Amino acid sequence: MKVIIYGAGQWGKVAYDLCKLIQFEVIAFLDRDKHKQGKNFEDTNIKVFAPPMC
């Protein structure tokens, strides 16, 4: 499965490590502040993880 992590920082790293552990393909990190409309991914093969802000 392809994954986009929405929100960088410590929680983004945790989400990245988790995705690697379960063998998901991380295709992008989006900065939460710069991509307010970042959840517009309609492709069903791409999941978006939005970790809580640190």
Image (cartoon, grey):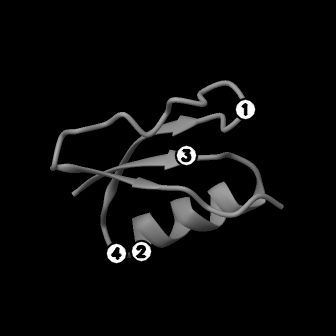
Element at label 1 = loop
Q: Give the number of callouts.
A: 4
For the residues labelled 1 and 4, say whether their Cβ atoms are less than 8 Å apart: no
Q: Residue furthest right?
A: 54
Looking at the rendered structure, the kind of residue marked 2 is Leu
Marks 3/1: CA distance?
10 Å
Tag shown at residue 20: none
**For the point 51% across and 29% down, which residue is it?**
37
Element at label 4 = loop
Marks 2/4: CA distance?
4 Å
Q: Mark 4 points at which residue?
A: 22
Q: Mark 3 points at which residue?
A: 6
Q: In which quarter of the image is the N terminus?
A: bottom left
Residue 31 lies, in percent from the top left, at 65, 34
Could you tell which of marks 4 and 3 lies nearer the N-terminus? 3
Q: In which quarter of the image is residue 28?
A: top left
Looking at the rendered structure, the kind of residue marked 4 is Ile
Q: Which of 27 and 34 is in front in this view?
A: 34
Looking at the rendered structure, the kind of residue marked 3 is Tyr
Marks 4/3: CA distance?
18 Å
Q: Mark 2 points at which residue?
A: 21
Structural crowding at the residue carrying mark 4, measured as other residues with C-alpha within 10 Å and reported as few (<14), some (14–19) or many (≥20): few
For the residues labelled 3 and 1, say whether their Cβ atoms are less than 8 Å apart: no
Q: Which of 42 and 31 is in front in this view?
A: 42
